[in-house]
Amino acid sequence: MTQAEALAILKTGANVFLTGEPGSGKTHTVNEYVAYLRAHNIEPAITASTGIAATHIKGMTIHSWSGIGIKERLSNYDLDKIASNEKAAKRIMHAQVLIIDEVSMLSASVFDMVEAVCRVVRRNSRPFGGLQVVLVGDFFQLPPVIKQRRPEPAEEEMLFEQAEAPKAPFAYISSAWRTLNPIICYLEEQHRQEDGVFLEVLSAIRAGEHTDAHVSHIKNRLIEPKKAPSGTVRLFPHNADVDRINDEELKKIDGAERSFLMRSAGPAAAVESLKRGCLSPERLVLRVGASVMFTKNNPSGSFVNGTLGKVTSFAPNGSPVIKTRAGKQIVAEPMDWTLEEDGKVKAKLTQVPLRLAWAITVHKSQGMSLDSAVMDLSQAFEYGQGYVALSRVRALEGLYLLGLNERALQVHPEALEQDAEFREQSDAAAGAFGRMPRRELEEMQSRFIKASKGIE
């Protein structure tokens, strides 16, 4: 399906899953649709499954937008509390279109929770309370991260149980996805990779059909670590390697160091639980010129978890001043990470919401488009990890490889099986809408604008 065909379907108000290979134009198509809606005075709710993905679409996480936060289950009490939250309820009630980017990293259980919240808050029994839902993503990329949790008390009435798919609880197996039944729009154009050979290699990996010849092309980009170009972003599967590189790069900068120590309050076990989920280190060391990444969403919207930048100075109160890649100057003041229980703060961490970012994990690179990157895939451990990393660069000449293992070239077998079905459904949708008279299609689009209280 072409971008133009997908855009025409989106304009009818249909629920859509927009997918395709990296570089096929998913984000561009969504941006075109957002511009179309705004031109008709309809403001869509733009969300993503992770903070880093939210940076690419200038939105917020679906967890924050829906009010579910870090919850992995919802009780009736939780649902009532969200519905009575004025800000969350207002966002959900006023929305007409909900966009969820990087849906591949959203688990089935969380997808079900978001759907239930929308239905209850909007007092509408239709899927997602009658919102047009636009899902964007690629299930060949990194799967959802599922945390181990303690069993809930048996007597508590729970709305959902986690879907029984311990290896790959993708959103498409959820009951919410089945009832939503989105039209599949599988984009087949390619706009990121300008190298035909590299594109063939990536397509072969994606199809699970790579040969020795394909692997040879990638291995030809292997280099010694000392020959890696300076100033090029580095990608690693593990945080330990990322931390090592960042520490080494920081030491190369002349100038005084500034240290920022994390403060904590609450029971030791609760504090440790918070620390495991906090991306900022307990001791943050910075110098002017350091590459950094924000680790928390700012409610005012000036930055989100994943915003990249550089330290340019320190404010009179000692806080680091960051110039983001978008050119914004932001004073990074300390922020709180809290753990609540029964509406009360049980534990709290306070730290400057930054971490060093000369090197980043493959997980954090998802959605980025890079001219070049140095990557070590010798310790890849997750399906899709190597595919995500490799597809960040536009051509083989921009790839500098330090290592490679067998797992790095494997995609998830369940995603591979589902992909064939998605492609068939997309072809059927393209055919059905392609046969539709133009006037009928335009009438459908016009009716959606009116139903959404837009301006024609």
Image (spheres, rainbow, N blue to C red):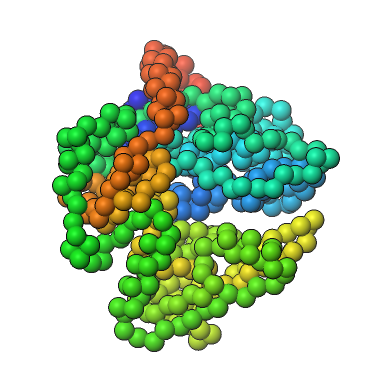
Determine if residue 430 is in view.
no
Please say if 335 is above or below 145: below
Q: Quadrant of the N terminus?
A: top left
| Residue closer to the observer: 177 or 445 | 177
Determine if residue 361 is in view.
yes
Q: What residue do we see at 69% from left, 52% from top?
A: 87
Please say if 150 is above or below 191: below
Q: What residue do we see at 64% from left, 61% from top?
A: 273
Q: Position of residue 67 (x, y in %)?
A: 67, 49
Q: Is residue 127 left or right of residue 352?
A: right
User: Which quarter of the picture shows residue 141?
Assistant: top left
Q: What residue do we see at 62% from left, 75% from top?
A: 263
Q: Position of residue 28 (x, y in %)?
A: 37, 41
User: Which quarter of the picture shows residue 253?
Assistant: bottom left
| Residue closer to the observer: 379 or 6 | 379
| Residue closer to the observer: 147 or 337 | 147
Q: Position of residue 143 (x, y in %)?
A: 47, 40
